[in-house]
Amino acid sequence: MTTETEFVQAFVDRFPVLRPDYDDHVEDMGELLPHVIFGVGEGFTDRIVDAYLGDDDPLDWRSVLMFFEEHFDRGDRGIDEVLVTSFLDRLPWSNQPGYDLVDQLPEQLRTRFDLLRPTAGATRDS
């Protein structure tokens, strides 16, 4: 089993464009806090949405989503908690820029997103 810390480190290793953000976070916090690095302020989730919106971010958001899908729901509760609470639950709402990223989520992540926001899917189909 992989811990959420190992997951974040593997994520940054796979997407080295995030290394400066990771290093700044560890320096500022004194340690890696997975939920914080994904969710607070200009965290990884915001970077992924910005990359989707084409805001000149070199992060390959499609590959990121596939990386998350590969690590989601594999029996590592800590990783699932980070992905659900600090990624999926922090994605834009339907009235915010970047919400269409939800339509790009791979199957397992989309299923969980729809459980988090059951009215989101209904609103989009209405």
Image (cartoon, rainbow, N blue to C red):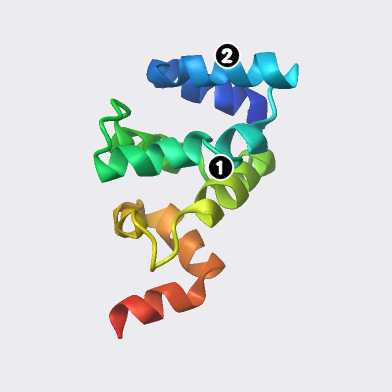
Horizontal side, residue 99 vs residue 34: left or right: left
Numbered tag placed on residue 111 in the rendering: none
Mark 2 residue element = helix
Hey, what amino acid is under mark 2?
Asp
Residue carrying label 2: 23
Q: Viewer-proximal residue, 77 or 12?
A: 12
Q: Residue 79's quadrant in the figure?
A: top right
User: Is residue 54 visible in the rendered structure shown here?
Assistant: yes
The answer for how far apart the CA atoms under marks 2 and 1 are is: 27 Å
Residue at 55% in and 19% down: 22
> For the C terminus, which image quadrant?
bottom left
Residue at 48% in and 41% down: 45
Residue carrying label 1: 74
Q: Residue furthest right?
A: 30
Q: Residues within 10 Å of mark 1 (few under 14, many from 20)?
A: few
Residue at 52% in and 36% down: 42
Residue at 65% in and 36% down: 36
Q: Residue 3's quadrant in the figure?
A: top right
Q: Earlier in the sequence, mark 2 or mark 1?
A: 2
Mark 1 residue element = loop
Q: Position of residue 106 (x, y in %)?
A: 35, 51
